Amino acid sequence: MREMILALSGERAGPDDLTPLPRIGATLAGQLRLAGHPPLSLPPIREGRLRRIADALGADPGDARTLQDWARELATSTRTLARAFQREVGMPFREYRRQVRLHAAMERLAQGRSVTTVAHELGFGAATNFSTMFRRATGMAPRAYFTRRPGG
C-alpha cells in the first residue's frame, strides 16, 4: 500500500523512510478525480421486509411502487419502513431506488442500449427525465459517461 501511495505521489523513499508524505491526500483525491466517478454499490440488505423490496427492485428496477404501496403490501406502516431503510441501508427509500435504477442504467447503457430505451425500461416518463437524474448522479450525460470514462 505504501509503495502504491508513493508511486501515485511521484515520490521515492528509501527502505528506512517512514516520514509521512504531506501531499498524499491531494494526490489520492486527484487520482480519484482522474479515474472518473466510482461505480455504484448497493448496500446489502438482510431485514426480511426490506429484502422483499430489494429483490423486487432488482428484478424490475422500473417498479414504481411507493413506500406507501410497499407498507400496505407488507402490512406495516410507511414510517416503520422508512426508519428501517434509514437504519439498515443508510439512506431513504427514494435514494435506494434511485441507486438501483442508476446501477441498472449503467449495465444497460454499457450493453449498448439507447438512452430512450433504458429510460423507459427503468420507469422514467421521458428520456430527458432520466438524463437529468443520471447527470445529477454522475456529473455527465448518459451517452458521455461511457465515452469519456477510462475503461468505458
Image (cartoon, rainbow, N blue to C red):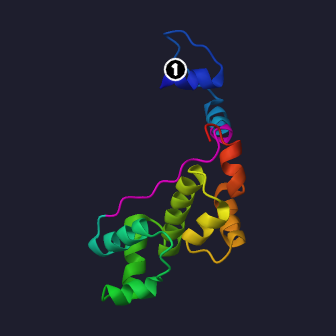
In this picture, residue 91 sits left or right of residue 45 = right
All told, the count of numbered labels is 1
Question: Type of residue at label 1?
Answer: Glu
Residue at (30% x, 76% y) in the render: 49
In the displayed orientation, state which residue is furthest to the left.
Answer: 48
- Percent x, y of residue 22: 64, 29
In this picture, residue 93 sits left or right of residue 36 = left
Most common secondary structure along the magenta stretch:
loop
Q: Is residue 30 above or below residue 92?
A: above
- Percent x, y of residue 94: 52, 74
According to the picture, the residue beneath numbered tag 1 turns out to be 3
- Percent x, y of residue 81: 38, 80
Q: Callout 1: few (<14), some (14-19), or many (20+) C-alpha neighbours within 10 Å?
A: few
Q: Could you tell me if residue 139 is visible in this image?
A: no
| 105 falls in the magenta region | no
At mark 1, the secondary structure is: helix
Report the span colored magenta.
Answer: 32-45
| 43 falls in the magenta region | yes
Quadrant in the picture for the C terminus: top right
Q: Nearer the viewer, residue 10 or 126?
A: 126
Q: Is residue 62 above or below residue 26?
A: below
Residue at (47% x, 54% y) in the render: 41
Q: Nearer the viewer, residue 97 or 148?
A: 148
**In which quadrant of the rendered view does residue 12 lie?**
top right
- Percent x, y of residue 10: 66, 20
Q: Could you tell me if residue 127 is visible in this image?
A: yes
Residue at (54% x, 49% y) in the render: 39
In this picture, residue 117 sits left or right of residue 140 = left
